[in-house]
Image: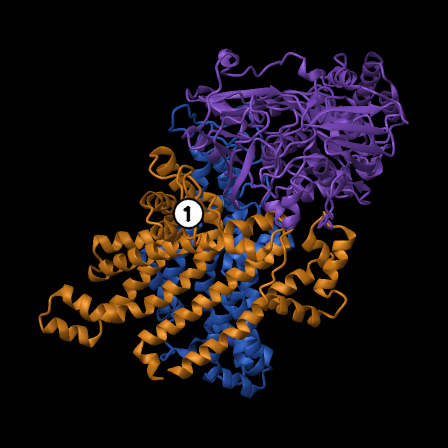
Chain colours: A orange, B purple, C blue
Amino acid sequence: MTGFIVRRILAVIPTLLGVTVVIFLMLAITPGDPAELLLGERATQESLDAMREYLGLKEPLHVQYGLFLKRIVQFDLGETIWTREKVSTEIKERFPATIELAVAAMLISSSFGIILGLISATRQYSWFDYISMVGSLIGVSMPVFWLALVLMLVFSLTLGWFPMSGRLGIDTNLEVITNFYLLDSILTGNGEAFWDALRHLALPAFALSTIPLAIVARMTRSSMLEVFRQDYIKTARAKGLSEFKIVMKHALRNGLIPVVTVVGLQFGILMGGAILTETVFAWPGVGKWLFDGVVKRDYMVIQGGTLLVATTFVLVNLVVDLLYAVINPRISVR
Amino acid sequence: MMKKFVMLVCIFVFLGAGSALAATPKKGGTPAAEPKKEAVAKPKKGGTLVYGRGGDSVGLDPAYETDGNSFMICDNIFEALVFYKDESTALEPGLATSWEISSDGLTYTFKLRKGVKFHDGTAFNADAVVFSIGRMMKNRNVKFSGKGWEIPKQERPPEYWVSMGMDDTVDAIEATDEYTVVFKLKKVQAPFIANMGMDFADIISPTAFIKDPKAFVRNPVGTGPFKFVKWVKDDRINLEANKDYWDKAKGPYLDKMVFRVIPENSVRFLELKAGNITMMDFPNPADIEMARKDPKLQIISQQGMNIGYLGFNHKKELWKNLKLRLAVAHAINRKAIVDKIYQGMGEVAKNCIPPTMWGYNKEVPGYDYDVALAKKYLAEAGYPEGKDLPEITLWSMPVARPYNPEGLKVGVAMLGDLGKIGIKARIVSYDWGTYLKRQREQGQDMDLFQLGWTGDNGDPDNFLAVLFDGMESAAVRTQWQNEDFHRLMGEGRTTVDQGKRAEIYKKAQQIMYDECPVLPIAHSIVVSPELKKVRNFKLHPTNSVRMKSVWLQ
Amino acid sequence: MNENAPAKMGWGHLAARCPLRARNPEERHPIFDQIEKFLKNKTGVAGLIIIVFFTLAAILAPLLTPYDPNENALYEQLKPPVWAEGGAAKNLLGTDDMGRDLLTRMIYGARVSLTLGVVSVGIAFLVGSFLGAIAGYYKGWPDSLIMRIMDIILAFPHILLAIVIVAYLGPGLRNAMMAIGIINIPRFARIVRASVMEEYGKDYVTAARAVGAGNRRIIFNAILPNCLAPIIVQASLGFGAAILDAAGLSFLGLGAQPPMSEWGAMIAQGRQLILRAWWVMTLPGIAILFAVLGFNLFGDGLRDALDPRLRD
């Protein structure tokens, strides 16, 4: 077990290094002077020279990469062209918003997905099963940004149930501590702000959750069906245990093990989907920031944002794998 | 010593003439709701105004910013020595109560307002002015009257200062006593005083700046009617009323202001309709109709001091062909563009200065939309039916500007029109910064480009020479080289009599019509929809957003 | 199977190898069983029908509509669909804000989406299969190297990587296709590698080697044709994903540029009109939904028919 964990953690290192290499190389092979690209068109000769020195452009490529890596380890991601603010500061201000959105979407997708999959599995080939499976197929086939717009059209515009954009209403006062608004409103005991933040979160989180929800539902269904075919369930059935008891007590634990992996892997999809969702709902998170960086060709933003999202993705996958090892008896034996 | 004349009155006469726009009655776009009683109604204090806008500010240090979204905030936090009047580019005293210009035009002496305090409680004085303006100079040829400060090294070039060539204009800045500042110039520069009213010349609190020069851009401290409170990136900027504002007679009336970022024009408009925001910028032209019908909304509009045009790349051999340019000019249905993309919020342009400006040449006939004629010109140009003409590029603006609300759509419309006479074109667009930069490079990959201009000071020179006289400078965006036109521009600048100048500019417009260096598209009407309760908000020709005297019913 | 075996191996000779694998030489080729099995799969067939429908629309576009997708008619702008108030049969699905016929643009949009699907999946397929085959066949360091690189590509959430690649290459449909192709390489590389490893020890490979066939020949003429099933399944599913990703890129303004009638770009355009013309935004989304659904259903059906092991 410990051996597995150590091996798995060590395996992350080359991947993360690879990520940094990719990010480094992308700028290096883009035509043009990297210093000019990073500083933008308004750079002066002095700042260009300083930047060239900073990047080590006179050195061979591998030395430049070494410097790049060194800066990353020191959390020095440079300054954005656009706002002249430290990239790390910009990220600090925005990342909580993205995490809040992604976690909410993950909660929605895993809870509803598991419930739908479970019911489908227990009533295989029923109408419910049929509809939910068709629904999940549609779910994975739908463009997220389109769904987001349709949700906005229906629920904000036509029905007026939810706000159209942003994280918090103008009249809502909230003392920001962690930048996770829901958490902050709980910490400060601000019920009004909590409700308001939740209403703002609802549509983007739901839109973002559709694809993972569909995948989780399908996965749960097939995994549960697999478990139902196992001998011990048959034995339990033969003993005359109630179906509910069988599912909850015996099948669920084993059936959900593979689902955990899937849920974890969805986090990456969420981080990617967040770019589109945040853009549609003007959600002030890392995804929208990164996209704005792309539009404005702010390479510091692109580098920093990409590094952040990819690293998060890799680390989440690591955690999921470790979790999987812990709950899955078969791996821990190895 | 130098003999000085008090020129205050003269200046006002001079500048007042220059901005005849202010006096001209507005055409078209009558405000949907114009509460006449306003003048009588006593402004009500209090309330929060939420302004919805398309993008976040870049930074809040006026010396270094270049974009409207940053200046929008600076306009309310900071003040300059001179102010532009409401709805015009005429000047009035600001932080300076009066100023004198020496007879040789090289020395400007400003008398400063007393008793003004920065938001951080420190006093506004001559040294603050020396510091604020002096920090932009390349050679810090400055003198403080008091202890003064060591001006920190600049992090980046002050864009406006540099692009306006101020280092070639300003020689030295001196505080001669606590409330007197003297500017010594290297050369005579008539617009200098007007320039001192622009955002980049805002006065900042030196104490606040010195404390942390890098952080000032996030924590601006000025003398303006509103104080900076908080900035949540990509989301909102909060301001609150400056209780100690020096000009209490004019405001501020609002308690708080929030500038919210809502990037999508349509979503922003919806938020306005829902009452979640109080005002907004850049509505989709097509949403204006809806705003008119909405009983909760009113529309403020002003004939814009602007021109949107389609330029030809004169650096490319192909476009030196006049007949080809005329073919394009007659092929494009500008009326359809103004009717259906500007949604009627503008008028088709004949000339490249707005019709409200003095010197406008009514006699110029303008290019008719005439496909047959366009085809004829195309054939005469040597490309019958577009044969042998390579596919051309049509650079289309990626952002909404007052003079062109939807560049990409305008581009698509033009593409279709050009196709009808056999010119194959494709749309090219970059982000706005890159677009402007690459446009200036005039590369061979650019054939036609959309651009436009909002005037700074109401003078035809500020349009015709700045935009189209390619012989003047390589920085002029239309690199059209025409001796006659260039000569007229020079004459216009050195002639004092406005009547004579008008004749010169009329001639210049006729040349432009004959030579077709660009195709003028439209002069737009600038529109701002707002909730009915908003009082006393006035659009400014320079597009600044000033909330000092705004109040809520 | 010996002296003439290598000659029989090839992409077009799928049937030639059947005597090897089928236990009874009289039995018909398993591909027919698979087709039959697939045809019994209702959802798979539904997917096929959808795909055929879109393909026909794309090919026959000029015959299906009297309009040009890029023909502006500004004075005809924002006409509602025929069933809505104010709609007319002239524009069945209404017009957009440039007065262009929406149905026409959607039909031509099928062309764009299918083309980009073919190109980007083609890139991913060719490069991915090649790399996967090398990794699976040679094992050792080429395998570790290639698979490490694939892991790194997979370390980026995929739309993010596509966005970043386009950010560096510059926006445009061609670059978007390239980016989507690149991010889908690991999909194919992994599957081909696994299949190649599985096939490696089998009789016919050993036989081919015995006859003295070169490595390249063995990989491309013998092994690859034998692992087509999972590749085809993956290609179909990948096709749907590529259409979705490309629509996302175009929606963000990084893919198809105006005036090209691409579905994602049309949604972006419709977004501005959300208040006044719901049809401009909603209808292209439905086209994407169905096209992607078609490929997903088809892929699932194929998977069930060709390779039951791959079922989830």
Q: Is residue C243 visible?
A: no
**Looking at the figure, which quarter contains the C terminus of chain C?**
bottom left
Q: Residue furthest left?
A: A240
Determine which residue is flagged by label 1: A175
Image: B91 above or below A261: above
Asked whether, in this view, residue C39 is left or right of residue A166, the answer is left
Residue B48, image x, y percentages:
45, 31
The answer to which of A324 and B18 lies nearer the viewer is B18
The answer to which of A227 and C197 lies nearer the viewer is A227
Name the residue rendered at 47%, 69% in the picture.
C228
- Count every numbered label the image shows and give the total: 1
Residue B484, image x, y percentages:
89, 24
The answer to which of A106 and C144 lies nearer the viewer is A106
Name the residue rendered at 36%, 84% in the picture.
A334
Image: A182 above or below B399: below
The quarter of the picture where residue B545 lies is top right
Of helix, strand and loop, which one carries label 1? loop
Asked whether, in this view, residue A48 is left or right of residue B231, the answer is right
Binning the other alpha carbons within 10 Å of mark 1 as few (below 14), some (14 to 19) or many (20 upward) gives few
The quarter of the picture where residue B129 lies is top right
The quarter of the picture where residue A70 lies is bottom right
Q: Is residue B266 visible?
A: yes
Q: Amino acid at mark 1?
A: Glu
Q: Chain of mark 1?
A: A
Residue C213, image x, y percentages:
58, 83
Image: B263 above or below C177: above
Name the residue rendered at 33%, 84% in the picture.
A333
The answer to which of B468 and A118 lies nearer the viewer is B468
